[in-house]
Image (tube, grey):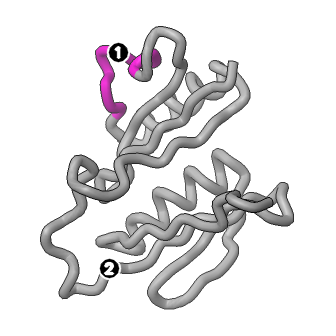
C-alpha cells in the first residue's frame, strides 16, 4: 500500500550483541524470521506477512562509532511495536527482566505512556529505546 513502511535500518555498534538482542525480541517474542544475512548485517521480517516492514541491522564502521548514539539527539527517538493485550506486556516485561534488560520509567511502569496506555519501555544494546504497547 502507498505509504506503508518498507524497512527500518539501524546501524549498530556491535552487530553480534545487537543480533542476539533483536533476534530474541523479533523472532522469539514477535514471530519474525531472519530475512537476509551477510557479513556486516542481518534483517528480520514478520513470518505471517508476505509484505511488511522488515528491520535491518548493519555494523557501524569504526570511523563512525564516535559519538555514540543517543536518542535525545536529532534522529530516531524510539521504535514502537504493538501487541494484542496487557498480558503480553506483563509476560514480555518478565522476560526482559530475566534477561537483565533495564525497564525504562520503572516508577510509572506499565503506564509510562500515560494513564490510558499499557506498555513497556526498554533499551537495545546501543540504548535505542523500544516501546511495546498493548492495543487493549
Q: In which quarter of the image is residue 130?
A: top left
Give left or right: position of 125 versus 115.
Answer: left
What is the x, y in percent for residue 103?
36, 32
What separation in Å lies between label 1 and label 2 (alpha carbons)? Answer: 34 Å
Q: Is 109 covered by the magenta stretch?
A: yes
Q: Is 68 covered by the magenta stretch?
A: no
Q: Residue at x 74, y 58 (%)?
A: 46
Q: Which residue is drawn at 84% across and 55% down?
A: 48
Q: Mark 1 points at which residue?
A: 108
Q: Which of 123 and 77 is in front in this view?
A: 77
Q: Which residue lies furthest to the top in this view?
A: 115
- For the N terminus, the image quarter is bottom right
Q: Which of 83 and 39 is in front in this view?
A: 83
Image: magenta residue range: 103-112
Q: Mark 2 points at which residue?
A: 60
Question: Magenta segment, principal secondary structure?
Answer: loop
What is the x, y in percent for residue 104?
32, 31
Q: Which residue is drawn at 46% across and 9% down?
A: 115
Q: In the rendered image of this protein, does residue 122 appear above or below residue 23?
A: above
- For the C terminus, the image quarter is top right
Q: In which quarter of the image is residue 108?
A: top left
Q: Which residue is drawn at 68% across and 59% down?
A: 3
Give left or right: position of 46 versus 106.
Answer: right
What is the x, y in percent for residue 110?
46, 18
Q: In the rendered image of this protein, does residue 9 appear above or below residue 37?
A: above
Task: Give yes or no for contact between labels 1 and 2 (Cβ–Cβ under 8 Å).
Answer: no
Q: Which of 100 and 82 is in front in this view?
A: 82
Amino acid at each position: 500500500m502507498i505509504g506503508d513502511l518498507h524497512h527500518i535500518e539501524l546501524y549498530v555498534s556491535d552487530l553480534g550483541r545487537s543480533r542476539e538482542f533483536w533476534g530474541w525480541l523479533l523472532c522469539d517474542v514477535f514471530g519474525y524470521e531472519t530475512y537476509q544475512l551477510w557479513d556486516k548485517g542481518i534483517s528480520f521480517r514478520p513470518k505471517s506477512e508476505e509484505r511488511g516492514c522488515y528491520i535491518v541491522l548493519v555494523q557501524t564502521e569504526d570511523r563512525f562509532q564516535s559519538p555514540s548514539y543517543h536518542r535525545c539527539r536529532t534522529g530516531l527517538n524510539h521504535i514502537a511495536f504493538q501487541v494484542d493485550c496487557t498480558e503480553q506486556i506483563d509476560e514480555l516485561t518478565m522476560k526482559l527482566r530475566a534477561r537483565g534488560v533495564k525497564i525504562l520509567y520503572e516508577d510509572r511502569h506499565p503506564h509510562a505512556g500515560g494513564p490510558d496506555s499499557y506498555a513497556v519501555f526498554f533499551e537495545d544494546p546501543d540504548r535505542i529505546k523500544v516501546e511495546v504497547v498493548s492495543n487493549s
